[in-house]
Image (cartoon, grey):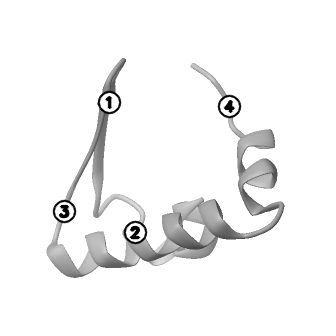
């Protein structure tokens, strides 16, 4: 989602997760952009389904 909507931010935010936690680390201004993008996708009709349909699992 971030790569598609904000390709200029690629590599500026580090992600980590476990079974019960998601962590994003980076510059506070970048994290605000990430939070806004996540909020938009979560609350947008069909956007979350679209994003999840394109996820590639490791």
Query: Please, is residue 31 above or below residue 55 in the view?
Result: below
Identify the residue position indicated by label 4 in the image: 56
Crowding at dot 1, Cα within 10 Å, few <14 / some 14-19 / many 20+, comes out as few
Q: Position of residue 46 (x, y in %)?
A: 83, 60
Identify the residue position indicated by label 2 in the image: 34
**Quadrant in the picture for residue 25:** bottom left
Crowding at dot 3, Cα within 10 Å, few <14 / some 14-19 / many 20+, comes out as some
Where does the N terminus fall, quadrant-wise? bottom right
**Quadrant in the picture for residue 52:** top right
Query: Please, is residue 28 above or below residue 26 in the view?
Result: below
Distance, label 3 to label 1, CA atoms, is 15 Å
Identify the residue position indicated by label 1 in the image: 17
Residue at the (51%, 68%) spot, across then down: 39
In the figure, is residue 16 to the left or right of 28?
Answer: right
For the residue labelled by badge 4, is the local secondary structure a helix, a strand or a loop? loop
N-term-proximal mark, 4 vs 2: 2
For the residue labelled by badge 2, is the local secondary structure a helix, a strand or a loop? helix
For the residue labelled by badge 1, is the local secondary structure a helix, a strand or a loop? strand
N-term-proximal mark, 3 vs 2: 3
Give the number of the mark in front: 4 or 2: 2
N-term-proximal mark, 4 vs 1: 1
Crowding at dot 4, Cα within 10 Å, few <14 / some 14-19 / many 20+, comes out as few
| Disc on res. 26 | 3
Distance, label 4 to label 2, CA atoms, is 20 Å
**Quadrant in the picture for residue 13:** bottom left
């Amino acid at each position: 989602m971030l790569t598609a909507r904000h390709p200029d931010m690629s590599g500026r935010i580090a992600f980590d997760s476990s079974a019960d936690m998601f962590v994003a680390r980076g510059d506070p201004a970048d994290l605000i952009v990430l939070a806004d993008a996540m909020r938009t996708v979560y609350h947008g009709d069909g956007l979350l389904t679209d994003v999840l349909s394109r996820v590639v699992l490791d």
